[in-house]
Image: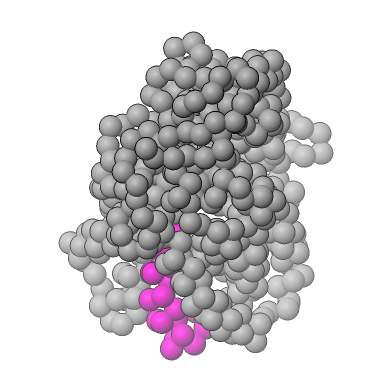
């Protein structure tokens, strides 16, 4: 790399290793966490919009609408939780701005605030989170297939269910193995098809809407905040750790507002529509028919349920590709010496085994509710720290230092940037102070949740975690990070010699 790092003069950078690759669908992507050269960045903001829209235009989000109604919310309360909770897709927009600037993944960018070794802690948290969502998806696929056989008179026994899980896991790994370009194309076209299903489903729902359900006695404020956390967790905050994994294929010159709005609106629009539809569909039967039926009420015509569930299988596999791709590159960022395709195989095996355990011996409803409520404990402060670091360093990174396993601008004290580690721990403690997971496993309610005047039982740990994580990091790191920003070269391109 040419130029003096202390002068801030512009320079060009060469990506670390790897031959030039063609960014094309239905070819195995060779890139993992290495830097994406400029000539391989073929994604457009419109492509990023449809990638996220295709992932979220999904039966899972229809189910989330019915799920929060099962908490006992009134229709107005559920609508308020959905509209407010989905504003947090702005978080995903902000967490996608670093990808075009660095050309690398979310948990390689995370090395800037945490250091190469300090970052391993949050990378591990993220890998567990991604795998958790993958397990959810494979569980839903397996449960849907089992339901389809049941609807047509065949009850699958234990060995048959195991075969279904194995086949679901193997199908699941195909698109993530092929990589970013394939994911973008597949999700875009699946979105078009699902929009048609959505229109038919909406027609059935509004034709049979139960208006008396709008007058149900509201749930307590504490219960409403729990529903709000679920919407935030499966939505804007829950996707932040994936943002840069996909925006890194945008050209470096992409205007930040276009990146932000593509990443924020792409998932927000279908999320709001589907969750609202789930709420209204819930009023038809007045209860969840069952998780295995993904919230499709029994009152829908039988001719529609079967094709809908068949297409739901493909949609569930599609949304899981987002998580599986990200979990693979996170495993690499964690330091596991494995190619991206190898990481996908590891995740597939883990997901299949855990899904089998849950299907035969677990309580999916309780396990999943606990998962959604607890992942915000680490996610909230991490997001606050990442964005504070981004602003402190004036949106400038040294990608070559991010890509190094040792040394470089972000090595600091043995590869650990203690201000970020301390801020993460303090932010997690703060989140736990105001969390209400009384209905989850393990059951826990924070002391602030129990005792805050007028908000007894409320759950605002996610907001407190973001604020405390960001605030502590700013207090401890602002001077040093600003100094690093002054030493960061302004890179104009990546080239291969």
Q: Residue 276, how many percent across, how many down?
A: 65, 68
* Secondary structure character of the magenta stretch overall: helix
Residue 119 in magenta? no
Magenta residues span 291-320
Residue 251 position (above or below residue 8): below
- The residue that appears at 48% across and 56% down in the rendered structure is 42
Residue 223 location (% of width, % of height): 67, 49
The location of residue 458, given as percent across then percent down, is: 71, 41
Furthest toward the right, the residue is 454
103 or 297: which is nearer to us?
Answer: 103
Percent x, y of residue 6: 60, 17
Vertical comparison of 461 with 170: above or below: above
Above/below status of 81 relative to 390 = below
Does residue 351 appear left or right of residue 100 in this picture?
A: left
Q: Is residue 493 above or below residue 137?
A: above
Which quadrant would residue 95 be assigned to in this image?
Answer: top right
Residue found at the very far top of the displayed protein: 413
């Amino acid at each position: 790399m040419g130029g003096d790092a202390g002068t801030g003069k512009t320079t060009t950078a060469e990506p670390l290793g790897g031959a030039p690759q063609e960014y094309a669908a239905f070819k195995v992507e060779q890139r993992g966490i290495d830097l994406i050269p400029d000539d391989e960045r073929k994604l457009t903001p419109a492509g990023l919009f449809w990638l996220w829209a295709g992932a979220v235009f999904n039966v899972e989000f229809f189910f989330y609408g019915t799920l929060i109604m099962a908490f006992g919310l009134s229709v107005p309360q559920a609508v308020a939780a959905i509209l407010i909770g989905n504003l947090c897709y702005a978080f995903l927009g902000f967490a996608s701005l670093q990808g075009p600037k660095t050309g690398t993944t979310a948990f390689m960018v995370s090395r800037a605030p945490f250091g190469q070794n300090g970052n391993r802690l949050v990378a591990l948290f993220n890998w567990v989170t991604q795998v958790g969502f993958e397990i959810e998806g494979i569980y839903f696929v397996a449960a849907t297939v089992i339901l389809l056989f049941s609807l047509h008179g065949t009850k699958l026994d234990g060995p048959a269910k195991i075969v279904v899980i194995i086949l679901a896991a193997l199908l699941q790994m195909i698109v993530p193995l092929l990589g970013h370009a394939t994911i973008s194309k597949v999700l875009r076209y699946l979105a078009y098809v699902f929009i048609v299903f959505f229109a038919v489903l909406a027609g059935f729902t509004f034709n049979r809407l139960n208006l008396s359900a709008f007058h149900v006695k509201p749930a307590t404020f504490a219960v409403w905040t729990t529903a709000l956390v679920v919407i935030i967790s499966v939505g804007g905050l829950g996707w932040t750790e994936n943002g840069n994994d996909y925006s890194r294929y945008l050209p470096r010159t992409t205007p930040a507002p276009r990146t932000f709005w593509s990443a924020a609106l792409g998932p927000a629009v279908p999320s709001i529509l589907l969750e609202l539809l789930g709420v209204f569909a819930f009023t038809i039967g007045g209860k969840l028919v069952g998780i295995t039926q993904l919230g499709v009420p029994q009152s829908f015509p039988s001719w529609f349920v079967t094709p809908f569930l068949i297409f739901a299988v493909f949609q569930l596999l599609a949304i899981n590709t987002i998580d599986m791709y990200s979990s693979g590159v996170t495993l690499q960022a964690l330091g596991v010496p494995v190619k991206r395709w190898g990481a996908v195989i590891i995740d597939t095996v883990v997901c299949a085994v855990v899904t089998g355990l849950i299907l035969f011996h677990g309580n999916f409803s309780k396990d999943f509710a606990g998962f959604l409520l607890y992942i915000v404990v680490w996610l909230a402060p991490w997001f606050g720290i990442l964005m504070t670091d981004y602003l402190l360093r004036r949106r400038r990174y040294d990608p070559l230092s991010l890509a190094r396993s040792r040394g470089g601008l972000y090595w600091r004290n043995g590869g650990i940037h203690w201000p970020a580690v301390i801020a993460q721990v303090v932010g997690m403690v703060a989140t736990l102070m105001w969390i209400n997971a009384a209905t989850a496993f393990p059951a826990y309610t924070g002391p602030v949740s129990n005792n805050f005047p007028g908000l007894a039982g409320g759950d605002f740990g996610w907001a407190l975690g973001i604020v405390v994580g960001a605030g502590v990091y700013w207090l401890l790191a602002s001077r040093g990070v600003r100094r690093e920003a002054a030493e960061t070269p302004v890179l104009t391109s990546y080239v291969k010699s």
